[in-house]
Image (cartoon, rainbow, N blue to C red):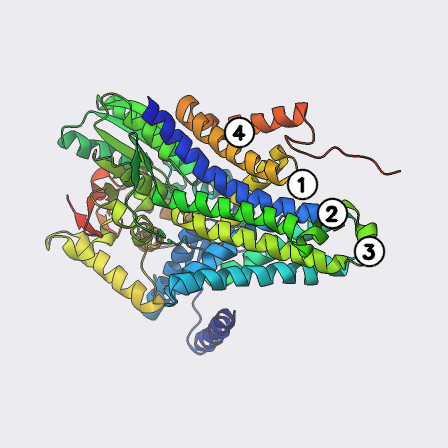
Amino acid sequence: MLRTMMRRAGKCAAVAAAGLMMMSAQAAEPIKIGSFLSVTGPASFLGDPELKTLEMYVEKINEEGGVLGRPLELVHYDDVGNASSARNFASRLIRSDQVDIIVGGSTTGATMAAVPLIEQAQVPFISLAGAVVITNPVKKWVFKTPQTDRMAAERILTDMKDRGITKFGLISGTGGFGSSGRTQTLEVAEEMGMEVVADVTYSGSDTDMTAQLTNIRNTKGVEAVLNFGFGQGPAIVTRNYAQLGMELPFYQSHGVASDSFLELAGSSAEGLRLPASPLLVPDSLPEDDPQKEVVQNYKAEYEARWDSKVSTFGAYAYDGLMLAVRAIEEAGSTDPAAVRDALENIKGYVGVTGEFNMAPDDHNGLDADSFRILEVQNGEWKLIN
Amino acid sequence: MLAEFLQYLFTGITIGATYALIALGFTLIYNASHVINFAQGEFLMIGGMATVSLTAMGVPMILAVVLAVILAGLLGIALQRLAIAPAKQADVVTLIIITIGASIFIRGIAQVVWGKEYHVMQNFSTSEPIEVFGAVLNSQSLWVLGIGAVMVVGLVLFFTKTLIGKAILATSMNKEAARLVGIRTQMVLMLAFMVSALLGSVAGIVVAPITFTSYDIGIILGLKGFVAAAIGGLGSGVGAVVGGLSLGIVEAMAAGYISSDYKDAVAFSMILLVLFFMPRGLFGAKVVERV
């Protein structure tokens, strides 16, 4: 409580100081970056690092002279993970704040609720949410920075195939992330000629998945197990998996690619593999990896500024902001149509999440290889490829 | 085949025992005041979270458990003193709403104090699972069952052998008459809240190594515990235990044999059926309208 108050007081002071400086310097019209994020509420683990990232890099860019000689101004609202408030805030950003570009939408739900409004108002929008529906089919004004769950499925299944696995069991959460991941996995498996021999689910509030795993274990022909889910569920699955003494290769999705998952799952996580952002293993990237420097810098700067662990989700906001800045610079103005066109033509931007190559039919711009396959060895992430 | 069945049974009994402990807490307060205390799940959360944070601060496990249970007990007393007692003559419905408010308040405080992350608690004994006829049993499950059994026996003794227990029973049967024979009913109510908070926190602590713990774990487990209490018949101790265990077992069997998608649906259909044919629950007392 006291800390928040102190922080607020600090912020006020900073704002006042910034105000004074602006008055003394020649006041160029700021470029308004709008954002609605789930900073509190159930999706706060997404929104919190995203907001911190946006705040800190907007500050940094302004210190370095802004964009096109104009300072950036971040207009931000907290949608509490609620899709209908996300829609309201998107409307406020467009109508009353009249922002030049929107970077936000922590969850797929929040993003999709705001999309119709944004399409109508014709404002460029970079979403920070995962599901494939956001950019497929392509929407004229909507872009996104995280990889899709389909790419995660492709990456995992490719790795399985490389290990000679063709039949696997799938256990997924019934939440939005898990069920979308399940659908994508089933589709990708069919395309790649692999067989999902067992397909079970659990709900987000379940506290024991032994029954489902026993079901998979007793299915004939299972060569590996994949868990697509989010939150604490996959950690419980991982523990139950170890308790049951199952020794088949075990995969998790990118939904749990964080250090807190390792803490929860403990030694049970040993040997499991998952697709993840290189942010988890910045130092083991090879020297010639173009992402190495970006990733190391982001991690160092974030951790120095906020004194807390960097997260993959904050990186989505980093890439979103940098893509927006780059598009505005290339467009040479904040004209919405010009910025949108510039965004669509960004090629070879190396971000923390991956290398972005946007195209008229690809508003995500990443490919499945931007995921790295990591394995847990001795309680730490180890880069496999 | 047998292994598979046993595996589902173990899973069901473990989680069912937790439901039963929570249901007992509901039963206790319901008996003493006819209030359904929706903050019951929060006692569970306080137990688990306080133990985790105390051990993280370097307090030995056993001491941490004791302190967490005491903290929950104090919270139970505070809940009755500060939220329920001032509402004196209010309707039961009003009191129930107060408990819902209190649960949101407690959860909010916990979120500020402990943050929103999930936390791990170590197993009490070995983390090696035990094998029985091809099925595996988490050693912590034995702790859950054992401590659950001890608590149930303890409660039975408390109600039948001690004066305070009998006073609580008397108050539940007839508040006016109890007051006439010199029982301080407010005191009894406070005790009921305290004992049920103790029960809840113990359940929260023993189950934490299996389920993890976080500031909002009480919502789901509390609700399931309430469902278990309703199946068994609100107010019946035996009903709470039977209701909890059967809910857990039905859930696990449905997840294993039918489909995990229908697990909750099967459990809830069971409640519908029970309440349809036996509106007072399996062991509910017959209601006599006083005129």
Q: What subunit carries mark 1?
A: B
The structure residue drawn at horizontal position 62% and vertical position 26%, both measured from the top left corner, is B274
- Can you tell which quarter of the image residue B3 is in? top left
Q: Which residue is mark 2?
A: B172
Q: Quadrant of the C terminus of chain A?
A: top left
Q: CA distance from mark 1 to mark 4?
A: 21 Å
Task: Identify whether B115 is placed above or below A320.
Answer: below
Number of the front mark, 1 or 3: 3
Question: Mark 2 falls on what kind of element?
Answer: helix
Question: Mark 3 falls on what kind of element?
Answer: loop
First reached walking from the N terminus: tag 1 or tag 2: 2
Q: How many marks?
A: 4
First reached walking from the N terminus: tag 4 or tag 3: 3
Determine which of the numbered discs, if any, sits on residue B235 in the image: 1
Count residues near mark 4 (Cα–Cα under 10 Å), then give few for <14, some for 14-19, many for 20+.
Answer: some
Q: CA distance from mark 4 to mark 3?
A: 44 Å
Question: Mark 4 falls on what kind of element?
Answer: helix
Q: CA distance from mark 1 to mark 2?
A: 9 Å
Number of the front mark, 4 or 3: 3
Task: Identify whether A282 is placed above or below A181.
Answer: below
First reached walking from the N terminus: tag 1 or tag 4: 1
Asked if disc 1 and disc 2 are in contact, CB closer than 8 Å, the reply is: yes
Q: What subunit carries mark 2?
A: B
Q: Which residue is mark 4?
A: B267
Residue B209 locus on image (x, y percent): 39, 49
Q: What subunit carries mark 4?
A: B
Determine which of the numbered discs, if any, sits on residue B181 in the image: 3
Q: Is residue B233 left or right of residue A143?
A: right
Kind of residue at disc 3: Val
Question: Mark 1 falls on what kind of element?
Answer: loop
